[in-house]
Amino acid sequence: MEKHNKSQAVDSLFKPFSLGNLKLSNRIVMAPMTRSFSPGGVPGPDVAAYYKRRAENGVGLIVTEGTLINHPAATGDPNVPNFHGEEALEGWAKVAAAVHEAGGRIVPQLWHVGMTRANGSQPNPEALSIGPSGLNLNGDKVNEPMTQSEIDSIVKAFAQAAADAKRIGFDGIELHGAHGYLIDQFFWERTNQRSDDYGGNMIARTRFAVEIIKACRLAIGPDFPIILRMSQWKSSQYDAKLAATPESLAQFLAPLVEAGVDIFHCSTRRFWEPEFEGSSLNFAGWVKKLTGKPTITVGSIGLDAEFLGAFKGNSAGVADINELLVRLDHEEFDLVAIGRALLVDPAWADKVRDGRWDELVPFNTEVLKKLY
Ligand SMILES: Cc1cc2nc3c(=O)[nH]c(=O)nc-3n(C[C@H](O)[C@H](O)[C@H](O)COP(=O)(O)O)c2cc1C
């Protein structure tokens, strides 16, 4: 793979991006990261300051932590923020305003955890966990399959959250369709054993997401971007795959594109890993190639200073920023999401832009305990 010198390479991360009304000053996206710092489901001033700090320091687009649609079993964690109810939405409106004041853009990641929640969890222990077939990620039966009226009410709740996102000043929405949570439980054969219109083959397994995307589109109109986050891997099931070949991935994506997804956020744990044999394209690369839609890549980018150092190549199990930027220059994907590196270092983007490599802070798990 060709090499870039750093200044050339870094330039391509800082080119503007626009899609309809969404105009970003650069290609850097803050990946959604659950923080559990919103007691009672209400994001407070500390949450607003946390996101604003990243926008002030050069992040183009923030995807918030997963935030809950209106359903009693949407989470098992009472400190995850709601995206419903007057108080929580007032909190979120202040978050969006703070990020805008700093020149950034922000979308909420709308979330329902489905069967990854244990029955009896707080904050609503009386609510039973729900999923397409009542199966957990191991495929064990825990509850009954979702009824049609449960499906309909969840679709409505996503659409209401999308409408609220627009009303209170966000720049788009992201649907959390990744990592084995509710929408992904419909995508994945192991957790979706339904024999009605929502299961039975790969296309039918997209139906729940398709209904959500269409209902959101109806609620927010044509110009408000919908990002869909998806992954082959599931939490605790890293080898899982929705699609084993490019052909089946194309089949899977077609109904989602048709329903109205604007940007696909392709979650992988390491951006440099080829998705299928015979091509170096990663997951975001394949999804862009197959759909023609813009994509976001993610996975172990900039986790430590070593990443920004000399070229190491794939064989050592690490890849440096040159490889990321060569791929970006080749338009394999459009945007680049950064998770843990931005969690530990709010100024990551500005430091990379200015070549202040020595100032980058390596990731450590201590930072998970505070909201800075
Ligand atoms: C503390 C933490 C919380 C996370 N929470 C979410 C989440 O709410 N929604 C989501 O889609 N991904 C979540 N992720 C995954 C990240 O968005 C990202 O895909 C992952 O960390 C890989 O990127 P990185 O290597 O740059 O950290 C989380 C990751 C971390 C470290």
Image (cartoon, rainbow, N blue to C red):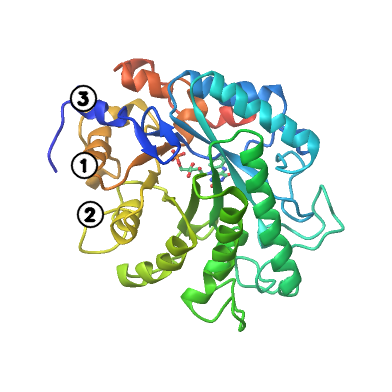
Report the Cα–Cα distance between label 3 and label 2: 22 Å
Pair 1/2: label in front: 2
The answer to whether the residue bearing label 3 lies less than 8 angstroms from the nearest atom of ligand 1 is no
Determine crowd level at label 2: few under 14, some 14-19, many 20+ residues with C-alpha closer than 10 A: some
Report the Cα–Cα distance between label 1 and label 3: 16 Å
Q: Considering the numbered disc 2 on the image, is that residue within a helix, a strand or a loop?
A: loop
**Side of 205 where 126 appears, left or right:** right
- Relative vertical location of residue 366 with respect to residue 225 in this rendering, above or below: above
Furthest-left residue in view? 2
**Residue 313 numbered tag:** 1
**Side of 254 where 178 appears, left or right:** right
Q: Position of residue 195 (x, y in %)?
A: 61, 84
Callout 1–callout 3 Cβ contact below 8 Å? no
- Say which label, 3 or 2, has the lower sequence index: 3
- Say which label, 1 or 3, has the lower sequence index: 3
Report the Cα–Cα distance between label 1 and label 2: 13 Å
**Residue 6 numbered tag:** 3
Q: Position of residue 223 (x, y in %)?
A: 49, 45
Amino acid marked by disc 2:
Ser
Q: Position of residue 48 (x, y in %)?
A: 64, 25
Q: Residue at x 28, y 55 (%)?
A: 274
Determine crowd level at label 3: few under 14, some 14-19, many 20+ residues with C-alpha closer than 10 A: some
- Relative vertical location of residue 305 with respect to residue 299 in this rendering, above or below: above
* Image quadrant occupied by the C terminus: top right
Q: Position of residue 83 (x, y in %)?
A: 70, 42
Quarter of the rendering containing residue 81: top right
Amino acid marked by disc 3:
Lys
Pair 1/3: label in front: 3
According to the image, label 2 marks what residue? Answer: 280
Amino acid marked by disc 1:
Gly
- Say which label, 1 or 2, has the lower sequence index: 2
